[in-house]
Image: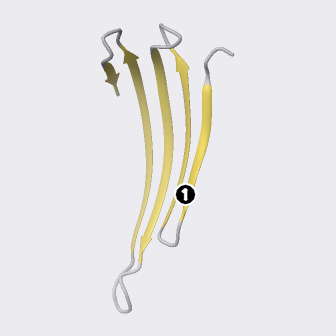
Amino acid sequence: RQGYQAGAETEVSRISKNVSVYGSRPWKHPLNDKLDARLTYEEEVIDQGKGNFDLSTRTLKASLARNIRRDSGWNRSYS
């Protein structure tokens, strides 16, 4: 009702797994100015073959952005 949005995304494959949660809300103008936040966890394992070490990574990402749509049609983003 007040323009808040939230959601989650997942990706799963043999090599990688990703989970994200995100949300957005209006800031100074209900349609043309909003804040977006996202938190993502990624895990990746790469099999290097027999006799080699496997590569494994775990990453946690956080982001915050403000998107402003101008009357001229241009968008301005701060992140």
Q: Nearer the viewer, residue 54 or 25?
A: 25
Q: Quarter holding the N terminus? A: top right
Q: How is the image coloured?
A: secondary structure
Element assignment for label 1: strand
Q: Quadrant of residue 25?
A: top right
Location of residue 51 with respect to 40 vertically, above or below: below
Location of residue 38 with respect to 16 vertically, above or below: above
Location of residue 13 with respect to 27 vertically, above or below: below
Please indicate whether residue 74 sits to the left or right of residue 41 in the image.
Answer: left
Please indicate whether residue 74 sits to the left or right of residue 31 in the image.
Answer: left
Instruction: Residue at 47%, 55% (x, y): give it.
Output: 42
Instruction: Residue at 41%, 80% (x, y): give it.
Output: 47
Furthest-bottom residue in this view: 51
Within-10-Å neighbours for mark 1: few <14, some 14–19, many 20+: few
Q: Quarter holding the C terminus? A: top left
Q: Position of residue 22 (x, y in %)?
A: 55, 36
Amino acid type at circle 1 is Glu
Number of numbered discs on residues = 1
Q: Position of residue 78 (x, y in %)?
A: 33, 23
Instruction: Residue at 49%, 46% (x, y): give it.
Output: 40
Furthest-right residue in this view: 1
Location of residue 4 with respect to 12 vertically, above or below: above
List the residue tagged with mark 1: 11
Instruction: Residue at 54%, 57% (x, y): give it.
Output: 11
